[in-house]
Image (cartoon, coloured by chain):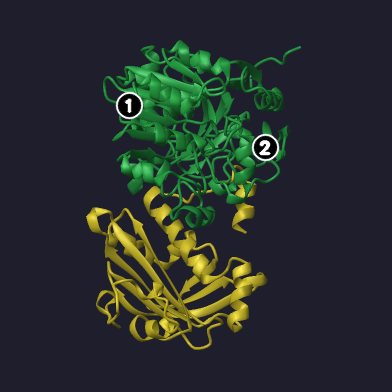
Amino acid sequence: MTDLANRDSRDDAPLTTSKAGDRAKLASEELVEAKGDSLVGKTVTINKTRQELYDFWRDFANLPQFMDNVLSIVQLDSRRSHWAVKGPAGRTVEWTSVITEDRPGELIAWASEEGADVPNGGRIDFRDAPGGRGTWVTATILYDPPAGIIGKVIAKMFQREPAIQARRDLRRFKQLMETGEIATGSWTRRQYDEEKA
Amino acid sequence: MRALTWHGKHDVRMDTVDDPEILNPRDAIIRITSTAICGSDLHLYDGYIPSMKAGDILGHEFMGEVVETGAKSTLQKGQRVVVPFTISCGSCFHCSKHQYSACDNGLPADNQDIAQVAYGQPMSGLFGYSHMTGGYAGGQAEYVRVPFSDVGPIVIPDGIEDDKVLFLSDILPTGWQAAENAGIEPGDTVAVWGCGPVGLFAVQSAFLMGAERVIAIDHFPRRLDLAKRFGAETINFEESKTYEALMEMTGGIGPDACIDAVGLEAHGFFADNVWDQIKVSTFMATDRTHSIRQAILACRKGGRVSMPAVYGGFVDKFPLGAFMEKGLTLKTGQTHVQHYMPALLNAIIEEKLDTTFLISHRLPLEQAPDGYKMFHDDQNEVTKVVLKPGMALAA
């Protein structure tokens, strides 16, 4: 797996922001085990150390706290976990994920096993932010949209599109890490539960 | 509880709704004792702000008594507090620099998308001001849920009446920040466009910061009288030509600092397609962007322009050439309320700042819909409506 910072490219911008039509293919060669033709990437700055953020993320039991679409994550062994995630139109999509690389305080990479409803692979990088501003957390995800492009459009309509979810999940991760809670505009418990459903 | 709810254009009602509950560890529940109608609430009332839903509770200027606290709130039951209109976490990079209105974490994650698209980065959350600013229930109610109660609300010492400190929630710090952004130096002549609450507080603040003269510009006689009360000279733009008057009143130099506080003060987002509607409906009854253009043209060479008046979208005919050639400095932004509250509370206690002069009407909360109508219909006489949940109904 190539180091993100040292890939061969025309400029210094991340591949996820490239205008190139084959960026997903490039990403699958450079970044993650090939698991799809759609590429999603997002970076958020969090005012905490790399190690603190890595440790919280690496304990997969923590992830549903800020990943709104995740129904359950069952740890199968030290590297494998089974994921159940809300899909479009009330569907549940499931897969088994294997950690392909794990560098404490730096990187967690994964790929789905054969038979996944939505084949996917990706990596979460934790890098020191410049100026002592904490950590850059970058999520890079490759996936095969269910039922191809139509599935992607439908997913987007239902706000279950991975790009939207990754963006919002990272914001919630930041909120939880920086403030100890996740912001909500609700004012009653009932309203809050309805929004979560 | 009883609450003022929005149902559509010129349709606000008193409804009975569920009481707020503690949902996050840093929350507190406040029992409202005083809450004001802001000029920017009129834009909700007029139906200009997108992403409102029927039943939304309005109000972002409020204070009251702490009645319930979350596990991580630092407030105590029984304390009296004024709550900032901005919802800021206190722990992100921007909050650590006291740029509270730029807080990264005050908006729920899903609500951040639209601000990200409109502005490039999302801003803080706001109480009672549409779903684009977080969908938070406002304070024109008997109770309100206050997030981040350990960093937002300021505790008010006993013996100071509500009316003196209520405006710490928004308009007083906004007027103060406007004057601060004008970089006032001793001996300066400062011009203030708009004598609404923000403009009037900017007038007072400018004098406290060392301005030798303040020239206030408006067309409502009562508001110009209030500005005069604090020592300002006035220009009524219906009687005089503003640019010409300013030049003559400054010996042909122009004001050292110009503050555009023309009254929309909309703490929110405007879609550009409503822009023209707003232009024709402003209380200045003139082109919406006229005041900022005039400020840039009148301002002396090398001077400073401060813009507390909110511009939510795009501005046409912005005099970029004059701005560049004269080497002006422009500062603006939503108010970092939490940053200013402690010092301004002291200034009120020491009677350096007068706040109660602004209040023209006090009503029971139950008559809030009347308050909106009055404020909407007569901006000369009605300078500020304060609602009191405990107050007896007028016969």
- Which label number is shown at residue B253? 1
Left or right of residue A174: residue A191: right
Chain of the residue where label 2 is placed in the rendered structure: B
Three-letter amino acid code of the residue under disc 2: Asp
| Cα distance between the residues tagged 1 and 2 | 40 Å
Q: Name the image quarter holding residue A160.
A: bottom right
Q: Where residue B93 appears, x then y in whole percent?
A: 33, 48
Q: Where residue A193 appears, x then y in whole percent?
A: 61, 53
Three-letter amino acid code of the residue under disc 1: Ile
Q: Which residue is mark 2?
A: B46
Q: Give the chain coloured yellow.
A: A
> Looking at the image, how many numbered discs can be counted on the residues?
2
The residue nearer to you, when weighing A71 against B2, is B2
Q: Secondary structure at mark 1?
A: loop
Which hue belongs to chain B?
Answer: green
Query: Does residue B47 lie above or below A170 as drawn?
Result: above
